[in-house]
Amino acid sequence: MPRFHCAQALAIGATIDLPDHVARHVQVLRLAVGDYVTLFNGEGGEYTATLSTIEKRRATAEIKTFSAREAELPYAVTLAQALPEASKMDEIIQKAVELGATAIQPLAAQRCVVRLSAERASKKISHWQGIIVSAAEQSGRNRLPSLADPAEFNSWAAQRDLHRRILLSPRAEQSLSDWARHHPPQAITLAIGPEGGFTEKEETLAQEHGALILSIGVRVLRTETAGMAALAAINAIWGEM
């Protein structure tokens, strides 16, 4: 059954106008009046609805039932990703949503090649938000991970955080998997460096403010691989249920 995010109030028995992008998607999928769809608004749970009308630029749906089903991890994981080159961030965000990340924090680290102006950052945030929505629709999540504005690494590292911060580095002496096996599931932030990795100065700064410096194995992973490997390892060790 096709799943669509609708950022509006949803209630059983209501007939709603679907958002423009959803109406377009309905037409692209060649859905017909009477077809069932799943709708969610990010506030929890999902609704089953039937398409009532499909016009050239408009579609409506009647909401039939509600399910409290969720697909969230039992612990919060924030992915703090240093900005990579080209469109790698798109794939990183998409896969992080699929793997259950609850928040995404873009970082501007010293070795980042990409530097975003205020205007470009605003456009990127809008673009990445669309990727989050699409990934949530595809993966069956009913809550959207939050997306923070890009932050300078040094200022971010100095901030107080209720989550345990873990910075991944090939120079670390302890592995993420070893640490996770000896600690109960808990809210964490995984910080991933850019293509050239975090500098030693950045690692020291993060450590001085309470971050753990851990590795994810003897092989050096690409920035677009490291976060996904870390998320998958945490999920495998701590479990998803």
Image (spheres, rainbow, N blue to C red):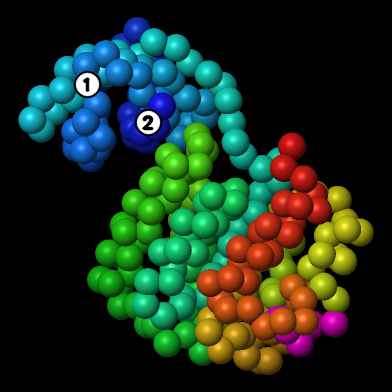
On-image quarter of the C terminus: top right
Q: Residue furthest bottom?
A: 200
- Crowding at label 2, few (<14), some or many (≥20) Cα neighbours within 10 Å? some
* Residue 97 position within the rendered picture, expressed as x and y whole percent measured from the top left: 52, 51
Residue positioned 43% across, 71% down in the render: 88
Residue positioned 63% across, 78% down in the render: 221
* Residue 94 position within the rendered picture, expressed as x and y whole percent measured from the top left: 46, 56
Residue positioned 83% across, 60% down in the render: 180
* Residue 50 position within the rendered picture, expressed as x and y whole percent measured from the top left: 31, 15
**Distance (Cα) linking label 1 and label 2:** 12 Å
Question: Is 109 placed left or right of 11 in the picture?
Answer: right
Front in this rendered view, residue 74 or 148: 74
Front in this rendered view, residue 140 or 19: 140
Q: Is residue 170 a member of the stretch shown in magenta?
A: yes
Q: Residue furthest right?
A: 182
Looking at the image, is 31 positioned above or below residue 199?
above
Residue that mark 2 sits on: 2
- Crowding at label 1, few (<14), some or many (≥20) Cα neighbours within 10 Å? some
Classify residue 233 by image quadrant.
bottom right
Q: Is residue 72 a member of the stretch shown in magenta?
A: no
Residue that mark 1 sits on: 32
Please tell me whether mark 1 sits on a helix, a strand or a loop: loop
Highlighted range, magenta? 169-173
Which mark is drawn over residue 186? none
Q: Residue furthest left?
A: 56
On-image quarter of the N terminus: top left
